Image (cartoon, rainbow, N blue to C red):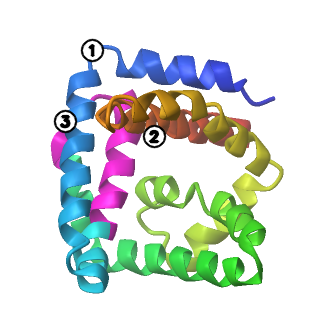
Amino acid sequence: MLKLNSELRAQAREALQGNWVMAAVAALIYSAIVSATSYLPLVGTLLVGLPVAYGFTILMFSVIKGIDLGILFEGFKDYSRIMGTVVLVFIYTFLWSLLLIIPGIIKHYSYAMTPYILKEEPEMKNNAAIEKSMVMMDGNKMKLFMLDLSFIGWAILCLFTFGIGFFVLQPYMQVSHAAFYEDLKAQQ
């Protein structure tokens, strides 16, 4: 039986205890890089934005073990494998979204564990990591969706801080996703 969302959020808060400032700084750096790459939409996103997004996910995954800001740029170490997989996830999600929005959202949740799988299984690439994510998420997509939905109140509160609160909320959500992955992995 998977943990309750409240337990996953509590695990994330515990992991972030003493690391909130470092996580917020990482979120600020990540946001600044992603904003800067938006000026070169396709090239900037492909060459820099996607590897840094992967690095941010892995950095928040490592919060459970201890933060090292250098991990933020880990997507560049194995660039072709990471990029190939991330681009495939984007293409697949986009194609499913063409059917209507709902199938795209469902597939987004099917592929949600792909970055963690890429990190933990460096020999796995492209479709193999995506397929493993789909198997892991079979029957668990709604659980992750509900976890994301549980942050809506916090997101609304962040709007009142003119977006500054998102630098704290973003790591909180990502570490909760990492806790979800760890729990899911333990169940399988």
Q: What residue appears at the point 23 percent right and 78 percent down from the top-left corner?
A: 44
- Residue 56 position, x and y percent, is 32, 50
Q: Quadrant of residue 60?
A: top left
Type of amino acid under label 1: Gly
Type of amino acid under label 2: Gln
Q: Secondary structure at mark 2?
A: helix
Task: Describe residue 68's horizontal placement relative to residue 79 as left or right.
Answer: left
Type of amino acid under label 3: Val
Q: Quadrant of residue 18?
A: top left
Q: Which mark is residue 18?
A: 1
Q: What residue appears at the point 48 percent right and 36 percent down from the top-left corner?
A: 173
- Residue 94 position, x and y percent, is 60, 80
Q: Secondary structure at mark 1?
A: loop
> Which quadrant of the rendered structure holds the C terminus?
top right
- In the image, 43 versus 127, the foreground residue is 43
Task: Describe residue 130's horizontal placement relative to residue 55 as left or right.
Answer: right
- Was residue 57 drawn as part of the magenta stretch in this picture? yes
- Was residue 26 drawn as part of the magenta stretch in this picture? no
**Upstream in sequence: badge 2 or badge 1:** 1
Q: Which residue is mark 2?
A: 174
Distance Cα–Cα, label 2 vs label 3: 14 Å
Q: Indicate whether 47 appears above or below 112.
A: below
**10 Å crowding of disc 1: few (<14), some (14-19), many (20+):** few
Q: Which residue is mark 3?
A: 25
Magenta stretch bounds: 50-70
